[in-house]
Image (cartoon, rainbow, N blue to C red):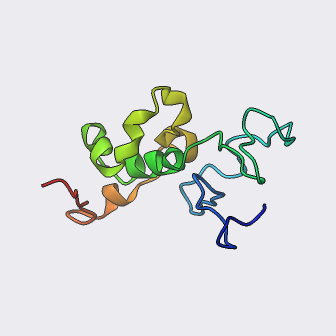
């Protein structure tokens, strides 16, 4: 990764994440390692920057579902979610979490309300 004109790095679109907990389906890696890192590859935009194959919102879509945010409110919580026309780019609750394990919304009555920044 080469520095930008100010000697730093550019902000990224995605990153690596780990999810830990009793309700997590462990031992899985979502996404894939690129098979070609060469300059000119369709995902290499230069200076060592690669276009991510899974968006940042993918992980948070499933976490938001797990904590009980209703489907019709997910676009308020994750505003960029709606630009991913292919739903296969977003992870669902079932992709990351075990069935029949109580989620936060199942065990904390009245807690865990979320905030929308819309007026």
Considering depth in this image, is 60 or 41 the residue closer to the camera? Answer: 41
Q: Position of residue 102 (x, y in %)?
A: 41, 54
Judge whether 29 appears above or below 8 on screen: above
Question: Can you name the residue that lies furthest to the bottom here?
Answer: 7
Q: Residue at x 22, y 58 (%)?
A: 117
Q: Position of residue 15 (x, y in %)?
A: 63, 56
Considering depth in this image, is 12 or 54 the residue closer to the camera? Answer: 12
**Rendered-image quadrant of the N terminus:** bottom right
Q: Residue at x 55, y 44 (%)?
A: 55
Asked if residue 74 lies left or right of residue 45, the reply is: left
Asked if residue 46 lies left or right of residue 98, the reply is: right
Judge whether 104 appears above or below 91 on screen: below
**So how many labels did they put on this image?**
0
Q: Position of residue 38 (x, y in %)?
A: 87, 41
**Rendered-image quadrant of the C terminus:** bottom left
**Image quarter for residue 7?**
bottom right
Q: Residue at x 44, y 45 (%)?
A: 61
Judge whether 70 appears above or below 48 on screen: above
Q: Residue at x 47, y 42 (%)?
A: 93
Question: Can you name the residue that lies furthest to the front here?
Answer: 5
Considering depth in this image, is 13 or 38 the residue closer to the camera? Answer: 38
Considering depth in this image, is 47 or 98 the residue closer to the camera? Answer: 47
Q: Position of residue 66 (x, y in %)?
A: 41, 50
Judge whether 60 appears above or below 40 on screen: below
**Image quarter for residue 115?**
bottom left
Asked if residue 54 lies left or right of residue 7, the reply is: left
């Amino acid at each position: 990764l080469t520095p930008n004109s100010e000697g730093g790095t550019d902000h990224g679109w995605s990153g690596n994440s780990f999810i830990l907990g009793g309700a997590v389906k462990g031992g899985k890696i979502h996404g894939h390692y690129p098979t070609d890192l060469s300059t000119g590859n369709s995902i290499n935009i230069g200076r060592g920057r690669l276009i991510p194959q899974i968006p940042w919102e993918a992980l948070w879509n499933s976490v938001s579902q797990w904590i009980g945010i209703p489907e019709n409110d997910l676009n308020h919580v994750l505003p960029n979610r709606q630009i991913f026309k292919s739903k296969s780019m977003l992870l669902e609750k079932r992709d990351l979490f075990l069935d029949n394990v109580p989620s936060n919304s199942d065990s904390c009555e009245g807690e865990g309300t979320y905030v929308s920044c819309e007026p």
